[in-house]
Amino acid sequence: MKTQFDNQVRVVSLENLRAMCKRISSVCHRFEVSKISRSRVHVTYSNPDEYGTPRPMTAVFPSYPSAFDWDNNPAVVLEYLRILHDNLDRDGWQAFEPLCDCPQLFRAPSGQWETRDEAQRGLIEPLETTET
């Protein structure tokens, strides 16, 4: 019997993927685009252990030239093909779920990346409060 599924897959530009990696990275959990080839984009995740050893894993995502920027800013499909150097006993895919769950980011006129909510909050003037 063949497996059946019907799902939507998220596709982002390479620039958005870089912004997403920067947004979800922290002191311990670090994400970065590490390699770009014609049809693949590699994202490396590192979570150093207590001795500072980085132990990086790499997710391989398919990509294709976008209709807008062609080779300069390819479209990346957020559906990993494989995890290289998986150090979580074949559960390394879980480390990349925050990347796949990252909210949509848009570049603000200031050049910073924001979610839709953050952008809308920036447009609304804060209410003036009067002290009583």
Image (cartoon, helix red, strand yellow):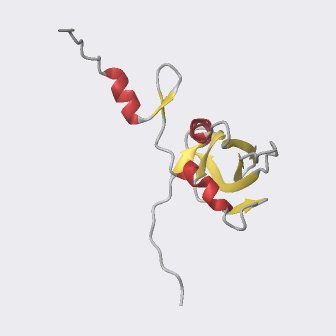
Residue closer to the observer: 68 or 7 = 7
Q: Does 29 sit above or below residue 87?
A: above
Residue 38 coordinates in the image, percent (x, y) = 73, 50
Q: Depth check: 121 or 89 in front?
A: 89
Q: The C terminus appears in which quarter of the rendering?
A: top left
Farthest-out residue, bottom: 1
Rendering coords of residue 88 (x, y %): 71, 62
Q: Is residue 12 left or right of residue 33?
A: left
User: As rendered, which of 27 and 99 lies closer to the eye?
Assistant: 27
Residue at image x 62%, y 53%?
96
Q: Residue at x 80, y 42 (%)?
A: 52
Residue 2 location (% of width, % of height): 54, 86
Residue 80 appears in the picture as rendered:
no
Check the image and report above or below for 15 versus 89: above
The residue most toward the left is: 132
The reply, left or right, for residue 67 in relation to residue 88 is left
| Residue 54 appearing in the image | yes
